[in-house]
Image (cartoon, helix red, strand yellow):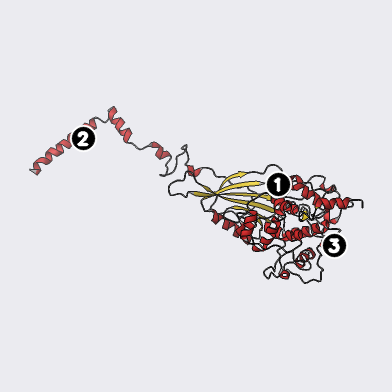
Amino acid sequence: MLPCKRPAAFLSLAVLLTALTACTNTPATKNLEQSLAADPRLQENPVLFGEASKGEPQSANNEPTVQLPADFPKDIPLYPNAKLQEITPASGSENKISTKWLSSDPSNFITSFYRSQLQDNNWQILQQPADDVGTFEARRGDLLIKVSIQAQSVTNAAPNQPQTATSLIIEYIPNSNDTAQSTPTTNNAPQPGDPQFIGPVAPSNSATQPSTTPNTPTTTATISASGEFSDLNKAPQELRQHIQDLAALGVLSIEPPGNKANSSNTNLFEPSKIITRRIYARWIVAANNAMYANNPAKQIRLAAESTQPAFSDVSKTDPDFPVIQGLAEAGLIPSSLSGDSTAVLFLPDAPLTREQLILWKVPLDTRQALPTANLDTVKQTWGFQDVGKIDPKALRAILADFQNVEKSNIRRVFGFTTLFQPKKTVTRAEAAAALWYFGTPGDGVSAADALKLKRSPT
C-alpha cells in the first residue's frame, strides 16, 4: 500500500509548486512578500535590543541630574548615599549657598557620619544636634558650614522601597570677618571676578581708613568711634540695648589684651556668632569689675603670672591666663582648686553652652552658697521637659536663677521656654544679655546703672 501512495504525493506537490510559480507576479503575492520581508531600517541603522532609537523619548533614568558648582569647597564632607536635589545660589548680603540632598538612609546614620567626619578632619564644631536629627555648625579656616539633617516620610513609596527618607541641607559661607582684615591679599589668592572667589568685596576706601580713633580705649577697639557696633541690627530686638550698654562700658572685647593687630579695623560684633569659653570668661570678669568699679570687695582678682596653672591647656603665656586662672581661684568655674578632679582642661576655644553660661554667672548674682537641687526640684520650678539632660553641676545654679524671678538670666536671655536645651551653644548676643545685670532683684546693678555712674560729673 505504501509504494502506491508515494506517486500520488509527489504528484500533488508538483501541482502545488506549479500553481505558486504561476502566481508569482500577482498583486497578492507581492503584498505577501513585503509583509514577510525584513525592515530595511535595520540594515541602515542596526540597534541593540534594550537601547532607545534616535528620536524616541529617553527613560526616566536618563534625566539630567543637578551638578555641584565648580567652586564647591572640597573640604566639605558629602554623605555617600545622598543625591543632590537642588542648589540655591548666593543672594543678598549673606553670600550663602545652599544645597539640598535626599538619602534613603536613616537620619541617625547620617548624623553619625557628619559627627565623625567633622571631628576627624579638624573642624571646629560650633553646634551639633543632641539627637539623631538637628543641625551641625562648624568652621575650618575661613569656611563656615551648616548641615541640617531632618527625617521625613515618603508619601508614595514604590513596592519594596523604604517608607522614610532623610533630607539633608548643606549651607556654606566663608567666615571672612575674622581673617579679611588681618591677612594680606597675595597674588595667588582668588580675586573678585575670579570664579574661585567667594566673599564680599572690600570697600574701595578701606585702605584710607584710619587705623585708630583718638581717645579709644584698647578694650573697645572693636567698637566704632560712636561707641556702637555697626551690625547690631542683626541682633534680636530685645537684646540690642543690653549689647549697646555693655559696649559703651568697654567690656565686650573680642581680641585678648595686648592684641591690637586685628581689633582696630572692624566694628562688627557678629551677634549671632557662637561665643567661645575664652571670650565669655574675659567678658564676665570685665563686666563684673566694671559694674562694681567703686566696690573692690565684689571685684574678681586677676591671677599673677607666677601662679601655678589650674588647667593644663591654659599656660602662663596664654593672653587670657590671668582671667581664666582668676575665675578658677575664685571658685567661679569648676577646677581642681574647687575639688573637681575631672576638670583638668578648660577648653578655651570650645563653644560655650547654656548650662555653662548659667553655672559661671549665677554665683556672681547671689554672692552666697547655692541651694541644694535635684532633677525633681528643677523640673517643678522651671518646668523644663529636658531637665534630665542638665549636668548635675549646673542644677544648683539653675535653681538659684529661678529664685531671681524677673532678674533671672534664663528669662532675660531666652524668654519663656519649657526646654532649656543645656548643651545648646550660646551666641554673643545671648552672652551679653546675661552679663547686663549682676545681683538679685533687691540688690543688683545693671550696665545702664554703671553707665550713669561712669558719665556722672562727680
Q: Amino acid at mark 2?
A: Leu
Q: Which residue is mark 3?
A: 296
The residue depicted at 85 percent of the width and 56 percent of the height is: 218
Q: Are marks 1 and 3 in contact (CB under 8 Å)?
A: no
Q: Which residue is mark 2?
A: 17
- What percent of the width, then of the height, locates residue 54? 47, 38
Q: Residue reaching furthest right?
A: 458
Res. 432 visible in picture: yes
| Relative to 98, 349 lies left or right | right
Q: Disc 1 or 3, which lies upstream in sequence?
A: 1
The residue depicted at 80 percent of the width and 44 percent of the height is: 204
Asked whether 415 or 425 is in front, the reply is 415
Q: Give how far apart the Cα atoms at labels 3 and 2 are.
A: 129 Å
Q: Disc 3 or 2, which lies upstream in sequence?
A: 2
Q: Give how far apart the Cα atoms at labels 2 and 1 are.
A: 83 Å
Res. 188 visible in picture: no
Q: Nearer the viewer, mark 3 or mark 2?
A: 3
- What percent of the width, then of the height, locates residue 10? 15, 39
Q: Which residue is mark 1?
A: 194
Asked whether 278 or 418 is in front, the reply is 418
Q: Residues within 10 Å of mark 3 (few under 14, many from 20)?
A: few
Q: Secondary structure at mark 3?
A: helix
Q: Secondary structure at mark 2?
A: helix
Q: Residue reaching furthest left?
A: 1
Q: Secondary structure at mark 1?
A: loop
Q: Amino acid at mark 3?
A: Pro
Q: Amino acid at mark 1?
A: Asp
- Depicted 100 relative to depicted 14: above or below: below
